[in-house]
Amino acid sequence: MSEYSVSFQNQPVDVSEEFSKQESHFFIGSNIKEFDQRSATGKIWWKSMALKQRVSYHQVTLPLEDYRVWRDVPPEEYQDDRDLPFSISFITPRTVRLRLAARPETTLLRKVLSHTVAFLLNHLLGNQPLQLSKLLVR
């Protein structure tokens, strides 16, 4: 049920309904497969999950359980669970940016451009240069 009786163009979208639908397919960050402290990059293992009905006596619950989209396809053709890259960068001494990739391949140019923009913004704001090696490595 919507909070507003009328729909407005700039009205916030309520996505909470999607998390209660049984037909929705979720990717949950399960664990960190690898992490390099010097470059602040790594890989997160994403598990595919879905809400499955569980009936116990006179109650029905919807816990998250493992979900496989393709059961008839060889495992190397389509991966339900996969590890995807992520990176951490410090915008200010008190602000951290976490970047998650939603695709297996990311281009080098995109990474270079994003780090260049972060460096330029930091310089324009008059902050000290970012030094990830001092912040991450003990």
Image (spheres, rainbow, N blue to C red):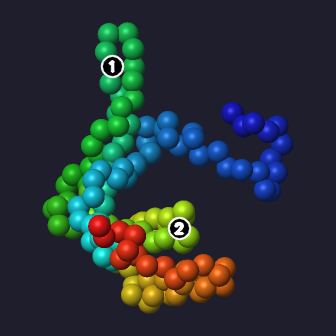
Please name whichever residue, 22 or 81, is drawn nearer the observer in this view of the structure.
Answer: 81
- Which type of secondary structure does the marked residue at label 2 adopt? loop
In the rendered image, which residue does mark 2 sit on? 93
Q: Are the two marked residues, 1 and 2, in contact with CB atoms closer than 8 angstroms?
A: no
Seen in the picture, residue 134 relative to 80 is either above or below; the reply is below
Q: Can residue 47 be seen in this view?
A: no
Residue at 27%, 58% in the rendered image: 32
Q: Quadrant of the N terminus?
A: top right
In the rendered image, which residue does mark 1 sit on? 55
Residue at 36%, 77% in the rendered image: 133
Seen in the picture, residue 134 relative to 57 is either above or below; the reply is below
- Residue type at tag 2: Pro
Nearer the observer: mark 1 or 2; the answer is 2
Q: Is residue 8 visible?
A: yes
Q: Where is residue 71 in the image (x, y as percent from the top left)?
A: 21, 52
Seen in the picture, residue 94 relative to 120 is either above or below; the reply is above
- Residue type at tag 1: Val
Q: Which residue lies furthest to the top in this view?
A: 58
Q: Position of residue 28 (x, y in %)?
A: 36, 50
Please name whichever residue, 52 or 27, is drawn nearer the observer in this view of the structure.
Answer: 27
Q: Where is residue 108 in the image (x, y as percent from the top left)?
A: 39, 87
Task: Using residue 64 as the reference point, say whether residue 131 is left or right of it.
Answer: right
Quarter holding residue 35: bottom left
